[in-house]
Amino acid sequence: MIKRIAAAIVGIGVAGGVGFLAYAWYPEIAPVAPPPPSAFSKAQIEHGRILAAGGYCAECHTRTDGKRGVELAGDYKMDTPFGAIFSSNITPDPETGIGHWSEAAFKRAMRKGISRDGTQLFPAFPFDHFTHMTDQDIDDVYAFLMTREPVHSVKRDNTVAFPFNIRLEQAGWKLLFLHEGPLKNNSAKDAEWNRGAYLAEGLSHCSACHTPRNAMGAEKSSAPYDGAPVDNWIAPPLNEHNPTPVVWTEDEYFKYLRYGSAPLHGSAAGPMSPVVHGGLSEMPESDVHAIAHYLADIDKASTRVSQDPQAIAWAMKASMRDLVGPQTDPNARLYAGACAACHANAGPQPVEGRPDLALNNALWLDEPTNLFQVILRGIGTTEGISTVSMPSFYHSFSDADLARLAAYLRATRTTLKPWTDLEKKAADVRKTLVASPVASSH
């Protein structure tokens, strides 16, 4: 009997293994000759260009770390808990890019995360979002990419460690986390909401950065849009857990996503800057409005906005506290000398492009990462709005200065508990900028 039970277990295991291999294996799709530009209409190529911008293709497929790469030629480094992954060349170069890919091969990669040769792709490529795009939109992106200038460029090798580098394992990841196919409209919502959901959850994959990841690198379905670390910054929560005292309304979202600055919150910087200026700025205003409409519903803005007038009034009062009477606090003097000229606000509302710090996300997050990033890097005119810049204090402030300033602002501009280990955290953020130019040098 024991032998029969053991044999049955082995048999089930073998059958399961065979079944998994049948699920995980995909054949190669035969290479094709690179299609000529005349194979696509001008309207299709232009629509594909707009979609590629809204999906941030160039941002993730262009090297930026120290050695400037050619747009769409790949080799962009993505640090993951499993190792570094370098993006692929998506120009139509036949040898190192996607020149031999057919529409069917491209669509399979977008829908299923499978390369033309049948290899399982890592989910650093957000196929779990692109799968929700329509066939026509995917075809139009293909048309745009295949009409770019071919660039011969070989990416660096990934450093994903064993056993996570076994490509076949990605099929198991997909069994658990890939929900394939176009999104279905929510009949309980209006057309603008459904358009915003399609763009945010599919093409623009907003939750890929703003949702925390589980131990397997998948977005936590229990915490959508709850905020997450990304590229040495913190992508803040986009739901009702966003800690800022003023609600992100549809109007604030639209101004931020379209123009790079929301008067009651601040300017786009770091990883969000190319999202705005290299991506969403190319899309129709109606689409950006739709994303804003969708996100404002996620954060329940309509039910929370009544608190805003009191929060703004409190922030304006806090803004001027350092400039009234003689100042004996050395930390207050540090702020007054370095920051107050731009951030102190005597008016009834914050000034566009010079956010009131008592309303800014950077001071209300659980960690001071974004605050240190902005102070050290500055914000260039290509990041937030073109008429305003913030200088870098990389060489002006020591880590001790940064710690003092952060502690002071957290205590006087928020109602939250103090941050800890500030000097160490300032040093850690500074280390991430050693190989990268600060914004003010652009």
Image (spheres, rainbow, N blue to C red):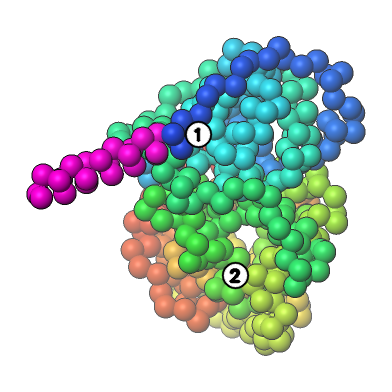
Image quarter in which the C terminus is found:
top right
Q: Nearer the viewer, residue 419 or 279?
A: 279
Q: Nearer the viewer, residue 27 or 304?
A: 27
Magenta stretch: give its range: 1-21
Image depth: mark 1 or mark 2 in front:
1
Tell me which label, 1 or 2, sits earlier in the chain. 1
Residue 148 % position (x, y): 75, 22
Q: Secondary structure at mark 2?
A: loop
Seen in the picture, residue 404 relative to 104 is either above or below; the reply is below
Q: Choose top left, top right, bottom left or bottom right for residue 96.
A: top right
Residue beneath the point at 64% across and 72% down: 299
Residue beneath the point at 46% across and 30% down: 25
Q: Choose top left, top right, bottom left or bottom right for residue 438.
A: top right
Residue 265 % position (x, y): 67, 67
Instruction: Report crowding for label 2: few under 14, some 14 to 19, many 20 or more residues within 10 A (C-alpha).
Output: many
Residue 16 lies in magenta, yes or no? yes
The residue carrying mark 2 is 239
Residue 418 % position (x, y): 41, 74
Q: Is residue 32 visible?
A: yes
Q: Amino acid at mark 2?
A: Asn
The residue carrying mark 1 is 121
Q: Is residue 334 visible?
A: no
Instruction: Report crowding for label 1: few under 14, some 14 to 19, many 20 or more residues within 10 A (C-alpha).
Output: some
Residue beneath the point at 69% across and 22% down: 102
Report how far apart the C-alphas of labels 1 and 2 lie in the structure.
30 Å
